[in-house]
Structure formats: structure tokens, C-alpha cells
Image (cartoon, helix red, strand yellow):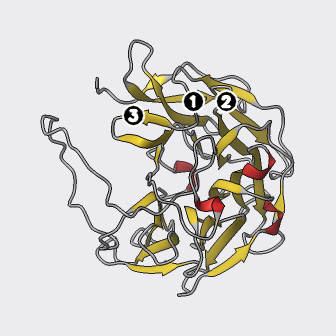
Amino acid sequence: MKSTSHATSTLSALAVGLLFVSASIPGTNAQTVQPGVFNTIPAKSLQAPSLSYDLNSPAITVGKNVDVNKENGPQSETSVSVDPTNPMHLLFSVNDLSVSSGAGAVVWESTDGGKTFTSFNQNPSNFCYDTWLGFNSTGDAFMSYECPGEQNIAYKKKGKSSWTSILLSSAGGAPDRDMVTVDTSTSKYKGSVYVGYDDNGAGNTPYVLYSRNGVKNWQRSAAAGPGGTIGVNVATGPDGSVYATWEDYGGKKIWSAKSTNGAKSFGTPHVVTNYRIDTTGFFIFIPPQNSRGVLPMPFTAVAPAGAANAGRVYVSYFDQDPNGSNTNIYVRYSDNGGKTWSAEAKVDDDTN
């Protein structure tokens, strides 16, 4: 997701497709997906997912696909990051649903631009999930992930071969859908590592965990907004501002809040958009994901210093077309720190 700097992250991850299964994992209720439970905890499938394709769709010219893990079983919720100090150094992380624990927070690494990969499971004996990746400006790698009732961060220093995992005990009782980002600006908060998430044990309240180096002194922000949240995405501006953006599924809104003190606290949240699609049931059932469904969680980036519109905040999401049932990708932007937002711009041009 990053090729030259954090702030030029692409907005390609526009919806998270979540693999559904009907079987629960023995030994813990937290791993059983039940109707009405608003979380993204995966469950292990005993059957391969059924797939269907529209053979009448026009061909798309793309590069050669590479099978990163060469496994037969399913994986879900992928994250991608590129080392800003070495574009041949790539990381891919997944919920690996083929491991013996039922779900693994697995990162696949390539040092030859994607030709070959090696893997590392952060907690090989535990049921772990919700992976997300980031690099700092010096090439240190970070991966946030969760295990039942636990929030974790793993890091690997540039040039080292081993990862170190840290339990972030201040995250609360039931952290969910974490996403890590790193401040690569020249501000006083440069190098800070942030993990946005919602605490499912506290009414799905949005929070941000922060550390000034990603290794020590992790702390939790004050609540960024009210509960009923999923998918807290964090982005940083060239002045060190921190933006937390999330889906309010009950209120059918996307909210964004700004911090000027390194995520210790956030200002008043503002509405980015009001969904037309019905988010009140949490998962949305579209034809390619008609069993468990998807979430229209927002993803955020900020234009870096020196770029056109430096400091402009962009939010991408999907929503229902105003003239039909088709879902589209939209982007809005703000030039005043998230207080007001532009009209939405539709990105895609499909009609079905």
C-alpha cells in the first residue's frame, strides 16, 4: 500500500470481504460468529467457499498473478505494505484460516519484489486475526493484529530477520478491526505508531493506541467518538495531525475526528457522509459476499507536504448508487481538518 511515503498510501482497500462459515471453533464462544454480534472475528470453515464468476464481463489487462502463500485453504482480510527505503521489500498479511489454531495472523515477506516469499505466524498456537501493516520512514515494519480479547503489535527492525510481538494491555476488553499506521512526516510526532480500533467490550467505542516509536510506552487515547463503531482507520498529516475515521453502522454515517496532540485526545467528530445503503444490520449482503457480507468501512489518506493540496484529507468508502441498487466507490475530501467535506466523487464506472 506504500511505495514512497506513508501519506501517498493508495485508497485501494475499499471494503473488507469477510469469509463466512457455519461451524464454530471449539473452546471459545468469542470465536463463534452469531447473528447480532457486531465484530469481525473470523470463524474457521470446514468447507471450501463456493465461487461464481460472470464470464460475460469484459477482460481486464493485469500483470501476472503470484500465489503468495501456495496454500490450499482460505485466507481473508489481506493487507499490503511496501518498504519506503527498498521497493523490492514487500509485506503481505492475512487471516490464515488454514492453520491448526483456526486462524493465524500471518505475514508473508518478499525481498525480491514479489518473486518469492517467506512467512511468519505471529502467534502460531493461538487463534489470531485482523492483520494490518505499516512501515516507518527508516524501514522498520509493524503489524497490528488481535487474538480473542487481546490487541497486539508486532515489529521487525530494518535489516533484522525476526519479529517481536507485544501485548497492548491498555486496549480494553474486546478490541476489534484494528488498523496500524505510522507518521512519516517531519513533525514532532514523526515515527509515532498508531493503531485505530473499536472496543467491542465497551459498546464498540472508537479508540486509538499510540506510541512514539511503536515499541515502548503504548497508551490509549480518550474515546474519539460515541459507540456503535467499526473500522477505525487512522491517517496522519504533514503537521503531525492525527485523523481517526470510522463507520457508525447504527447511525448510517461515517465520522472523522482530528487530534493535534499525537492522539492523546480528539476534537469534535464531524460527519463525512450519510450512507444510503442500510448499515444497521452491520454486515451488508452483496452478490459476491452473500453469506457473511461486507462492511463499507472508510479508508483515509492525507496529501503530504510539498504535494498539491498538502494537508487535504481524503476518505474513500463504498455506498449504494442514489439511482439504484448498485454499489459504487466514492471519495470525499476536506481542506479544513475534517470540519466540512466535499461532495462525493464516484470512482468506478460499472453498472451492475
Determine the residue positioned at 65% across, 60% down: 30
Residue occupying image coordinates x 56% and y 64%: 129
Q: Position of residue 213 (x, y in %)?
A: 74, 70
Say whether marks 3 and 1 touch (CB < 8 Å): no
Measured along the vertical axis of the image, is residue 197 above or below residue 103?
A: above
Q: CA distance from mark 3 to mark 1?
A: 12 Å
- Label 2 neighbourhood size at 10 Å, few (<14), some (14-19), many (20+)? some
| Label located before the other in sequence (3 or 2) | 2
Quadrant hosting residue 248: top right
Using the image as rendered, state which of residue 31 and residue 157 is in the foreground.
31
Residue ID for mark 2: 250
The image quadrant where one finds the C terminus is top left
Q: Are marks 2 and 1 in contact (CB under 8 Å)?
A: yes
Between disc 2 and disc 1, whose residue precedes?
2
Answer yes or no: is residue 136 visible: no
Please, what is the three-letter code of the amino acid marked with disc 3? Ile
SS category of the residue bearing label 1: loop
The disc labelled 2 sits on which kind of residue? Answer: Gly
Mark 1 Cα shell of 10 Å, populated few (<14), some (14-19), many (≥20): some
| Residue at screen point 28% across, 23% down | 351
Residue at the bottom extreme of this rendering: 161
* Label 3 sits on residue: 286
Tell me which amino acid carries mark 1.
Thr
Task: In this rendered view, identify the residue nearer to me: 91 or 205.
Answer: 205
The residue where tag 1 is placed is: 279
- In the rendered image, residue 175, in percent from the top left (x then y), is placed at 71, 57
